[in-house]
Structures are given as C-alpha cells and as structure tokens.
Image (cartoon, rainbow, N blue to C red):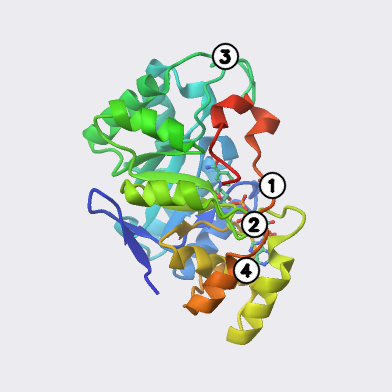
Amino acid sequence: MNTNFTLSNGNKMPAVGLGTWRSEPGVVGKAVLDALNNGYKHIDCAYVYLNEKEVGEAFHEAFTTGGIKREDIFITSKLWNTRHTPKDVLPAFEKTLADLQLDYLDLYLIHWPVSVDPNGEDFNTVENPVPIIDTWREMEKIYESGKVKAIGVCNFSIKLLEELNKEAKIKPLVHQFELNPYLPQPKLVEYCQKNNIHVTAYSPLGSGGVPSVLKEPILEEIGKKYNKTAAQVALSWNVQRGITVIPKSVHTQRIIENSQIFKLDQADMDKIATIKTRLRTCDPALFFKKDIFEGSYYD
Ligand code: NAP
C-alpha cells in the first residue's frame, strides 16, 4: 500500500497518523512515543486538545535521545476558533510551536470555519465575525515565512472551500474532515480530489460513536476474509480512496494494529460503499451555527 501521499506543493504526507484528541494528560505522551517507536511518521495535534505540552515533551524525548529524526516525522496542529482575529493567528501558531517544542510544523489547519469570542472560554459560542479570508491571509504569511510546510482547513463545506479558493493566494493543501464507512462523504471527497486538496479522514474509526463502526457486520465479515480487524478494514478502505487516516488510540496494541494498512479487492470496496450512512459524531450543529455547514454533509 501507498504509505505516503503527495501534496500539491510536492511535500509528502504519510497515509497513517496518530490522532491525539481525547488522549488524556498522563497518557498522551506515552501514546505518541509508542506510535513513533512503532513506525508512525505522522502525529495529528491541536491546541484545543489541551495536551500539546505533553505531546511536546514526547517529541523532545524522541528527537533528542529516542533515535527518531524530526525531519522524518509529519506533525500537524490546528488554529482554534478563539484565535481567528488576524492579530491572534501568529501568536497562536507560536504558542503551539513552543508547546510542541518544535521550530516548524509540517501542516497547520484552521480547525473550524467558525470564529468565536477571543476573550471567551475556548468552547464559547459567542460569534466574532472575522471573515475567513482575513484569518487565511495570516495562515498564508506563516506558510511564506517557512515555519509551516503546508496549510489547510478542517470541516469546510464545498461552498466554503469554493469561496476561500476564489480569494486565496495559496490554496488550502489539505482538508481534514470526518470520514469513515458510516460517513463516506463522496461529494466532498470528489471535490477536494479534483481540486488538488489532499483529504485527511478524522474519526476514521467512528470516534467511539454508537452504532459502532467497529462492530459493523460488513466490515467484520470482510475482515475475516483477510484475517484483519474491522478497524484495519475501515482504515485501509479510506487509504485506498487516496485519503490519509489519523486514528486515535492510547493502547500500544491498537496503535500497532491501526498502522497495518492492506489492499482490499474492488468487490470489497464496493461492498463497503453499500453501508448505510449514519449521523456525524462531530456534528457541528451541536456546537455551532448550523447554516455554516449547509450543503456539506450527508451527501
Ligand atoms: P477515532 O480515531 O475514529 O476513534 C478513536 C476511538 O476508537 C477511541 O475510543 C479509541 O480508544 C478507539 N480505538 C482506536 N483504535 C481501536 C482499535 N483498533 N480497536 C478498537 N477500538 C479502537 O476517533 P477520533 O479521535 O475522533 O479521530 C481521530 C483523530 O482525528 C483525533 O484524535 C484528532 O486527532 C482528529 N480529529 C480532528 C477533528 C477536527 O475537527 N479536525 C475532529 C475530530 C478528530 P482507545 O484510545 O482506548 O484505544
């Protein structure tokens, strides 16, 4: 299987990375070290996961005494919704860089197309009307400074991507959104792939939601045929569609299991496409104004 994808600027992005959302303090550092020591070349972080300091300590250990080279690892982080005001973007990026103990990132993403009160709580829903292009201009400046090797977005609809693409000097190189066999989002994937925006699947195992992707009978049945788990089938299905996956786990055996991508027959890919679409686990309607996402999901 392809272990790297190529972004539109020529940089490589590994097909599998470790997710770190809801990996708790005291646990996340070990998970990152476990992943790096078991061959992962890609770690997905974010300011709002509130664990970047501990992830940074793990990076420091790996890159100083752990025998891992920084340049071999692809590290992503994300700008949180309270930091969309142009003057706040660079300081937010620098805070993440300092917490992660790095001097550059491989990818920096706008976490949501939603700007909230910079003086409120991190999850405050009070709107702060900053046009996304103003935030993007600051992302472009960071990219041009060389401190990040690629920039992109998360959770954008096709409509929002089109609007951004019209004005952007540097087009988003990556779009990260929820993608798993219960939420295949074919139109959004097709739009990104046609427009050279590399897709990353978050919650590729369904994020512990109910019903569980990992208990889906079609995935279990296909898994039996290849002697693989439902998790490995779900992840391999996305990678085979040209998509990077970032499964989260804090358990060594699962971290190893999730990195073992394999090739599925076309008949099995087609069978997975028949699985009934379910609701999103990261439903923005729960957190944010719903009309921002109009026309993007459940396609
Ligand atoms: P996920 O990776 O789909 O699922 C994680 C859940 O599955 C955890 O409960 C984990 O438990 C369990 N698990 C992992 N591997 C397993 C296996 N082989 N067998 C059985 N259970 C397994 O969910 P996610 O954390 O929502 O998404 C992955 C990453 O995407 C996040 O961590 C984050 O980095 C990113 N993300 C980004 C956004 C965004 O807005 N950009 C939103 C959501 C997520 P254990 O840890 O106990 O193993």
Query: Which residue is denoted by mark 2 in the rendering?
Result: 182
Please name which of the two marks, 2 or 3, marks the residue nearer to the observer: 2
Label for residue 162? none
Mark before the other along the chain sequence, 4 or 2: 2
Mark before the other along the chain sequence, 3 or 1: 3
Please name which of the two marks, 3 or 1, marks the residue nearer to the observer: 1
Query: Which residue is denoted by mark 1 in the rendering?
Result: 279
Query: Mark 3: which amino acid?
Result: Asn
User: What residue appears at the point 36 percent right and 29 percent down from the top-left corner?
Assistant: 164
- The picture places residue 76, in percent across and down from the top left corner, at 42, 46
Mark before the other along the chain sequence, 2 or 3: 3
User: What residue appears at the point 55 percent right and 27 percent down from the top-left corner?
Assistant: 292
Query: Which residue is denoted by mark 4 in the rendering?
Result: 231
In contact (CB < 8 Å): disc 2 and disc 1: no
Mark 4 C-beta closer than 8 Å to ligand 1: yes
In the image, taking residue 230 as reference, residue 191 lies left or right, namely left
